[in-house]
Image: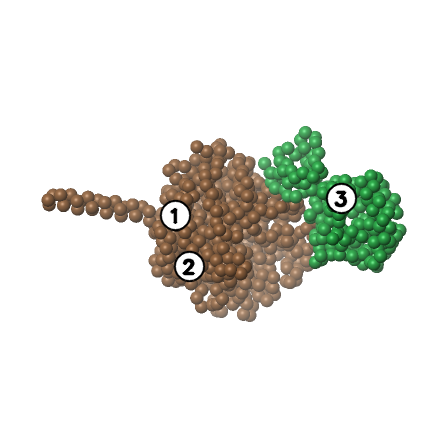
Amino acid sequence: MGTLPIRSVILAAAMAASPLLWGQTPPDILLPPGDAARGKAVFTSTKANCQSCHRVQGTGSLFGPDLSAIGAPPRGGGGGAGRGAAAPAPAAGAANAAPALPAAPAANTANDTMMRQLAQSILDPNALVTVQNRYVLLTMKDGKKISGKLLSVDTFAYQIFDSTEKLANVSKENVREATMTSPMPSYRDKLTTQELADVISYLMSLKGQ
Amino acid sequence: MKRKLRTVYVALGFLTLAAVSILQAQQITFDRLLHTDKEPQNWLTYSGNVLGQRYSLLNQINTGNVKNLELQWIWQAKSLEKFETTSIVVDGILYTIQAPTNTANTDGNTQVVALDAATGRVFWRYSYPIPQTATACCGRVNRGLAILGDTLYMGTLNSHLIAINAKVGTLIWDTPVNPTVPPARNYPITVAPLIIKDKVIVGTAGGDGPIRGFLAAYDAKTGKEVWRFYTIPGPGEPGSETWSGESWKVGGAGIWTTGSYDPETNLTFWGTGNPSPTNQAPTRLGDNLYSDSVVALDADTGKLKWHYQFTPHDDQDYDSTQNPVLADIEIKGKMRKVMLWANRNGLMYVLDRTNGEFIQGKPYVKVNWMDGFDEKGRPHRVPGKLATTNGGDGTAIMPTILGATNWYPPSYSPKTGLFYVSAWENSKTGGPAPAGGRGGANTTPMADPALAPNVKTEEEGYGVVRAFDPKTLDQKWEFKMNDITWAGVLSTAGDVVFSGGREGYFFALDARNGNLLWKIPLGGQVNSGPMSYSINGKQYVSVAAGTSLFSFALRN
């Protein structure tokens, strides 16, 4: 037997970003000023249900990237926590009142870029995924679906961290199809523009220890 | 009384004769090295025979029963390095090498080890000190030993060739192969020596640095140099015009893998490494002969008889660090004495080994740096597909600088007539990363003994074992892995192909169609070429993975 093919079409969108790619400018988006406190409320609400996958300061699931330091300054230019990207520090006072994201790329500071990336990740989770955070959706031969963070893949099996927070070695013999796709839903129709701005503001306030 | 004495003398005479006979039986003569097909129970050279085929005539393990293989023994090396050695087996004794134990700050030792090939029990160990300054570009590795008579030969990372008594593991002689040009660390030896007649042939690696590569032959008895062939011609010699200025003095063209030998023509064939500096091609204008070439030398004199350059004026590190594989095959209705070569540059070649004639060539992975050959086999380079330091346009070049393949040995089965190669696909260097993903050499680092998680996608590179018909160079089958590979290939008369990869699996394929027949995870990367031997009628297959050596046989 050979390798079970991974659908390349989806891969093109879902594959990890290199540090080079991470430097690319996300799409422009116009948002009102955000409020971190309101954003935290949205983040922890059942409506957004973010903690079902993400952990912040010890609370929430380990399935998705830990966001405790998502707003921290970059460490050596890349490979930070959470999304694995260098996250520049927001401007002073931004923890409670993030500025509106400008529509023009001229104001593309590192801080703005960071917020754009957060917005993009929330609205289009498959647009930008780092190597450390690749997820695979396995459709088993019995129809069952297993989603997991891809820890490693070899010729015969997937090694994943599944949605029940268990490490699992899944034999390819039992897999009908494997798709590299993020299990995170798009929040494009789930959050208002203000809520999105607030959540981004909250995330920018998370600096880790 | 006299009669009794006579009887004793006669008995002693018989005993002496018997002892001499046994001793001679144990001696490895060159004739035995030439005719390894008569004793398939042994594995007497790096490639199994002087033709470089890495093919075992043993067939006890075959496509029908290979699924019943089970581990017989493990020998664990004390080393942090990749275990790239192919062991040799002589009449039940397995000789292998523990890679130097150096760390970045400490000296260490290379150890030659004699084991019972049936049980893995150690008979003796011989340690050779290696200063931590002695290293090759890509690891402190050693790929193997040679044997002649009852003497083992090994090259060292600090540029020595040593002879060791195979029975007791004591040093016989120690010859520095490059005594005049310091520092020795630029001239490491990683290659298993090749015995031809009464000579031991080795070459120097280190061609990624400022050296002038060479091959040299040494008297097997004394260790004295007999001949030397520089892989870069000196001023006034043919080929010297292919180097600009003084670049020839430091042009690289090292030797990383063992050559082969054609007894009919008394020619020995060796692949040469990249020109140096690799990424500064404008400093060494010209074709840079005999880098990235195969050179055919008279085995007695070291004189060059012919050469073929695979990649003229290389700027991609496409060194020809592969074992020349010799075979006699029918091409277009005519039997040809050929050399098969799957090159790091992504192209597979068939050459006439008697004169170097280019018979045919073809990509065996995705290749975009060239788009054809002229009638003499010179590749036509695609404009722009150069290193950016050499005028390239910065677009991705395939294959990557780590190549379509590398030093790890291929195999040719005279039984199936197929040529088996471990290769990398979709590896590329330079240019923009693929959409949303990584790209280039950084995704395909050099090998390591330990397993590491792999999340590469197919577009980011993967490993394969591929089988080709050398008559046409058409691919017959492939076995895909998720991760890339740094493992060689063994084919056997049981129609089984053995190989492995960085995922740590050692596996058996059907040599005729590539079907997976058996696999076992070994807990470390397989960074070596498998080999096979037998003891008392029981066939073993051995491979190194991680820092250990494993031997398998059929379940009793």
How crowded pointer 3 is (Cα within 10 Å; few <14, some 14-19, many 20+) is rated as few
| Name of the residue lying farthest toward the left | B1
Question: What residue is drawn where x is 78% and y is 47%?
Answer: A121
**Which one is closest to the eye, mark 1 or mark 2?**
1
Question: What residue is drawn where x is 84% and y is 50%?
Answer: A36
Which quadrant holds residue B287? bottom right
Task: Return the x and y of residue A204 as percentages of the image width and height.
Answer: 80, 52
Task: Return the x and y of residue A143 as percentages of the image width and height.
Answer: 70, 30
In front here: B482 or B157?
B157
Question: What residue is drawn where x is 60% and y is 63%?
Answer: B281
Horizontal arrangement in the rendering, residue A189 relative to residue A14 (left or right) = right
In front here: B474 or B39?
B39
In front here: B283 or B107?
B107
Any idea which chain is the green one in this picture? Answer: A
| Name of the residue lying farthest toward the top | A142
- Kindly identify which residue carries mark 2: B161
Asked which colour scheme the image uses, the reply is by chain
Q: Chain of mark 3?
A: A
Q: Is residue B472 visible?
A: no
Relative vertical location of residue B190 with respect to residue B66 in this rendering, above or below: below
Any idea which chain is the brown one in this picture? Answer: B
Kind of residue sitting beneath label 2:
Leu
- Kindly identify which residue carries mark 1: B123
**Which one is closest to the eye, mark 1 or mark 3?**
3
- Alpha carbon of mark 2 to alpha carbon of mark 3: how far? 62 Å
